[in-house]
């Protein structure tokens, strides 16, 4: 070896090391930016909403102050935010599973309805059972009903390649009409019929199936613990089991997964089924934890808001936990903001819609940026490999 030759690799390696450190720094910055994107998107949406409030001669500072106070300013606001967060978290967990398999579940509204109808029917049918048995069975029945409603578009996609967005949206309409039939027919409250009041609601479910209230004089119930336990279980399922790994592999690259022997249609159908089951649990929990009966409008838009919650949480089950609390707080605080500054309810819906738009847009931008970074890394690796193969 010629003198000085041994120092050449070190000389060449120093710039490479600096380049590697620079890439690591850029990666860390990119991850930090990606993690903060949903929060930045919410701030941007609220700024646009502030401009709309100014056009209506309303004070944005007072309006948003009332929103924050209503959501997080006291025991009542915090507990109500947690009540709203419970179904949002359950729906969001199902959305995480579906999106990880590269399918889109827009049918959570209908799945919530089926879970609520099944839970109401079951608890009324077996009202003599003790609570320790009736509560878990009712939740399982709600899961099964929602899973069945998610299985239908799942099997249609797996067997016939039917677009799941269209089928899940249509299933929402079918579920709504089915609930209207049930609460005006077989499940209508008999006491109301005897009194001549044909209200669109069912009889109250038996008290032994009611979920325990955690804070007196509030609606906060033990369903929040069920949602948190399912969030942890969903994380373990997706990241610590073979089935979860295959679901995520299907979402990352369906063609490569198919080539590796993974039955892509089966796991896409399974993900829609599980997503429907978790939404069905949300419906069952809403019946036995909050309303104690089936009534019109029981979904409160959770099926669509849950999509935003999952995106806000980075499509990660554990990230969806704080995201559901934040978005639940926005829903609660929006009501107080409307009363405080006397703005139309349509403006509140517009601001919430802006939050949805900005969050979804930020997630799309983050995915595009990650794809460009991956392509760049592949090109750098290919160039380095080609340079090493070039003879001196």
Image (spheres, rainbow, N blue to C red):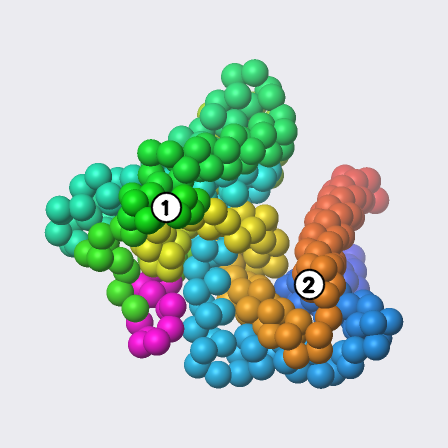
Residue under the image location 39 percent in, 54 percent down? 286
Q: Which of the two discs, 2 and 1, labels the residue nearer the N terminus?
A: 1
Disc assigned to residue 167? none
Vertical arrangement, residue 205 with respect to residue 290, above or below: above
Residue under the image location 19 percent in, 56 percent down? 208
Residue under label 1: 196
Residue placed most toward the observer, 390 or 266: 266
Residue under the image location 40 percent in, 31 percent down? 148
Residue 174 lies within the magenta run = no
Vertical arrangement, residue 63 with respect to residue 286, above or below: below
Query: What is the crowding at mark 2: few (fewer than 14 residues within 10 Å), some, or many (at least 20)?
Result: few
**Residue 141, how many percent across, how many down?**
30, 39
**Which is closer to the viewer, label 2 or label 1?**
1
Residue under the image location 60 percent in, 69 percent down? 335
Residue placed most toward the observer, 244 or 180: 180
**Residue 48, how many percent across, how many down?**
81, 67
Vertical arrangement, residue 231 with respect to residue 170, above or below: below
- Left or right of 388, for residue 331: left
Query: What is the crowding at mark 1: few (fewer than 14 residues within 10 Å), some, or many (at least 20)?
Result: few
- Left or right of 389, for residue 286: left
Q: Secondary structure at mark 1?
A: loop
Chief SS of the magenta region: loop
Residue range in magenta is 214-225
Quote the CA–CA distance across marks 2 and 1: 33 Å
Where, by quadrant of the figure, is residue 219 drawn?
bottom left
**Residue 35, how many percent across, how many down?**
64, 64
Residue under label 2: 345
In the picture, which quadrant includes the N terminus? bottom right
**Residue 224, how many percent across, how many down?**
37, 63
């Amino acid at each position: 070896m010629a003198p000085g030759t041994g120092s050449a690799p070190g000389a060449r390696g120093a710039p490479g090391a600096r380049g590697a450190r620079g890439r690591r720094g850029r990666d860390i910055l990119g991850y930090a930016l990606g993690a903060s994107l949903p929060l930045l998107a919410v701030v941007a949406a609220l700024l646009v909403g502030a401009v709309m409030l100014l056009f209506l001669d309303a004070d944005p500072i007072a309006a948003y102050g009332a929103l924050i106070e209503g959501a997080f300013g006291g025991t009542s606001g915090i507990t109500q935010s947690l009540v709203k967060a419970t179904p949002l978290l359950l729906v969001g967990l199902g959305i995480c599973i579906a999106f990880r398999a590269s399918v889109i579940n827009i049918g959570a509204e209908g799945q919530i309805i089926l879970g609520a109808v099944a839970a109401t029917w079951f608890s009324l049918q077996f009202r003599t059972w003790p609570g320790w048995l009736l509560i878990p069975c009712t939740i399982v029945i709600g899961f099964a009903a929602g899973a069945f409603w998610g299985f239908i578009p799942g099997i249609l996609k797996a067997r016939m390649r039917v677009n799941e967005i269209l089928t899940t949206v249509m299933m929402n309409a079918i579920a709504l009409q089915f609930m209207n039939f049930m609460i005006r027919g077989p499940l209508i409250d008999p006491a109301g019929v005897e009194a001549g009041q044909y209200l669109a609601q069912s009889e109250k479910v038996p008290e032994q199936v009611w979920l325990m209230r955690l804070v007196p004089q509030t609606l906060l119930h033990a369903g929040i613990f069920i949602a948190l336990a399912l969030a942890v279980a969903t994380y373990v399922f997706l990241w610590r089991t073979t089935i979860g790994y295959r679901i995520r592999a299907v979402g990352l690259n369906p063609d490569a997964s198919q080539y590796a022997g993974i039955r892509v249609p089966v796991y896409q159908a399974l993900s829609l089924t599980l997503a429907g089951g978790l939404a069905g649990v949300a419906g069952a929990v809403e019946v036995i934890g909050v309303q104690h009966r089936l009534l019109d409008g029981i979904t409160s838009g959770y099926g669509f808001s849950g999509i935003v919650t999952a995106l806000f949480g980075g499509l990660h089950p554990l990230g969806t936990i704080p995201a559901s609390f934040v978005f639940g707080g926005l829903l609660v605080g929006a009501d107080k903001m409307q009363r405080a500054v006397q703005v139309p309810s349509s403006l509140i819906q517009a601001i919430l819609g802006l939050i949805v738009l900005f969050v979804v847009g930020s997630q799309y931008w983050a995915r595009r940026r990650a794809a460009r970074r991956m392509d760049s890394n592949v090109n750098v690796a290919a160039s380095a490999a080609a340079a090493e193969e070039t003879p001196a």
